[in-house]
Amino acid sequence: MGRFAFLNVLKEVAGILNESRKLFLKNKTLMFSVLVFTLLLNCLVFLFNIFVIEPEIMNLMAESRLLPTTDPSTPEYAACIMRIFADVRQIVASSYILTAVSSIINIFSVIFIVHASALSLKDENIKIKDFTVLSLKSWKGPLVTYFYIALFSLGYWLLLFIILFPILLSSTLSISDMGSLAVKSGALFIIFAVFQCYLAIVWNLSMVISVLEESYGIQALGKAAKIVKGMKTKLFLLNIFFGLLAFGLAQSLQVIINSRRSLSLTITTGFVLVCLVFVCLAFVMRMFQLVAYTVAYFQCKSLQGKDVESLTDVEYTKLSSTALMG
């Protein structure tokens, strides 16, 4: 009986994925516009990382290699140290800019994707201009919710480091101990990653709620934990599915990076284009996940006995430009 129940859950997960796929065909213009625009923004962030931060890191590594070969009593030694400090400050500043910009782009990507998915589910037609204004108006809630999720995620992985740090201190440099340490660390990381997939059920759903409703922050997280009852298993399997896809993409990209480092002559342009392809695939996967969670949100509402078509929290109307200006 348990096996048949699990198969039914898998069928329901496949149903969510199939419904998400159909949304891209319901409103092709809107969904394609959102995909292209947000994908372009994410590619610009990636290019900033490749052409700005990576050269700064390579320059810092080159300066660090020169330091041991320089006589500490010479002025060149002090000049080399000053250049290293300057490089570190530049990398930190660039990293802060990259983090801030990528976070803002990520938040607005979530807003655009969730709104477009909800409109497609309700078979509403809206102009791109009106859709942009509608989406930009709802930035506050997702921003606050994203901040809380980032704090919870940071604390969660900090807990992993706190647990792992004593294990690292107690290990020796012998080959047998290093193998045992790798097994323990890997097992602990897998456990934490799987449990994060469970926590991400509420985190992802709360982002959808903060976009479509007037709840945000702790209130959105609490509402997500409340309405998700009855669908946790399906959404957990959904997160596992997307997590495995992300892991496969990351491993494939790592193989490409390692092969590039092993070659004496490489074409930088081709390498960047290959990396851009992986970035595009990762974003498309993330977009599909958000669409799936939007579908799951409406299913959660339906399970609570609410008519999806009469939800007052998600009322989309064909607004004229004059009304929007007002």
Image (tube, rainbow, N blue to C red):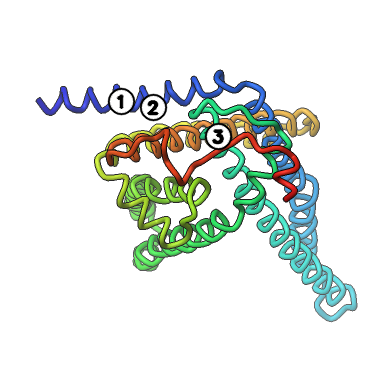
Which quadrant holds residue 45? Answer: top right
Tell me whether the residue at label 2 lies in contact with that at label 1, contact meaning CB atoms closer than 8 angstroms.
yes
Which residue occupies the foreground of this view, 187 or 211? 211
The residue sitting at 41% across, 37% down in the picture is 310
Mark 1 = which residue?
A: 12
User: Rounded to the nearest whole Å, what is the CA distance between mark 2 and mark 1?
Assistant: 6 Å
Answer with left or right where residue 97 lies relative to residue 251: right
Which residue occupies the foreground of this view, 281 or 72? 281
Of the image marks 3 and 1, the number of the one nearer the N terminus: 1
Mark 2 = which residue?
A: 16
Note whether 92 is above or below 322 in the view shown. Answer: below
> Amino acid type of disc 1?
Glu
> Amino acid type of disc 2?
Ile
Tell me whether the residue at label 3 lies in contact with that at label 2, contact meaning CB atoms closer than 8 angstroms.
no
Mark 3 = which residue?
A: 287
Residue 163 x %, y %: 35, 64
> Amino acid type of disc 3?
Met
Indicate the secondary structure of the residue bearing disc 1.
helix
